[in-house]
Image: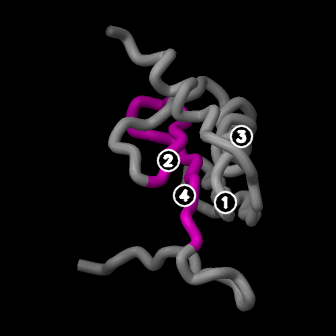
Amino acid sequence: MTARAEPSIPRGAPSDQIAVRVSLNGRGDWEIALPNQRERVTCETLDDATRVGYLCAASRRPCELIVFDAYHRMLHRQFVDGHGESSCERRQHASTPD
């Protein structure tokens, strides 16, 4: 079994960096994986998922946004130093049925 290597953290970045990841799930939805969250936020398009992923990353301090394409290739990687509470967690709970 071959382990898939995680993207390395660039020089000068904190080693305790948390990451928000955007990728395609098995059902064809674009999924935003949030740190320390079991449930994931889903979007219909890659553009929407990237925008939501950026908002989620911006609400954490500091955070890395990593966007993968449908073939698991890294499309975009950005370090974000955000402020404030997570608007993403509120959005996730609002979209979850009761």
Q: Which mark is residue 72?
A: 4
The Cα atoms of the two marked residues, 4 and 2, are separated by 17 Å
Nearest the camera: 93 or 21? 93
Region rendered in magenta? 17-35
Say above or below: 61 vs 53. Answer: below
In the rendered image, residue 43, in percent from the top left (x then y), is placed at 58, 27
41 or 57: which is nearer to us?
57
Question: Could you say which disc has been placed on residue 55 in the image?
Answer: 3
Q: Earlier in the sequence, mark 4 or mark 1?
A: 1
- Label 2's element? loop
Q: Is residue 2 left or right of residue 16?
A: left
On the image, the x and y values in percent for residue 37 come to 39, 45
Q: Secondary structure at mark 4?
A: loop
Residue 34 tag number: 2
Q: Residues within 10 Å of mark 2 (few under 14, many from 20)?
A: many
Task: Identify the mark nearer the N-term, 3 or 2.
Answer: 2
Instruction: Choose mark 4 or mark 2, whichever is in front.
Output: 2
Crowdedness of circle 1 by 10 Å Cα count: few (<14), some, many (20+)? some
Read off the residue under disc 1. Answer: 61
Q: Residue furthest top?
A: 98
Q: Amino acid at mark 3?
A: Leu
Give the mark nearest the N terminus, 3 or 1: 3
Q: Residues within 10 Å of mark 3 (few under 14, many from 20)?
A: some
Pinpoint residue 14: horizontal percent, then vertical percent. Answer: 64, 81
In primary-sequence order, the first of circles 2 and 1 is 2
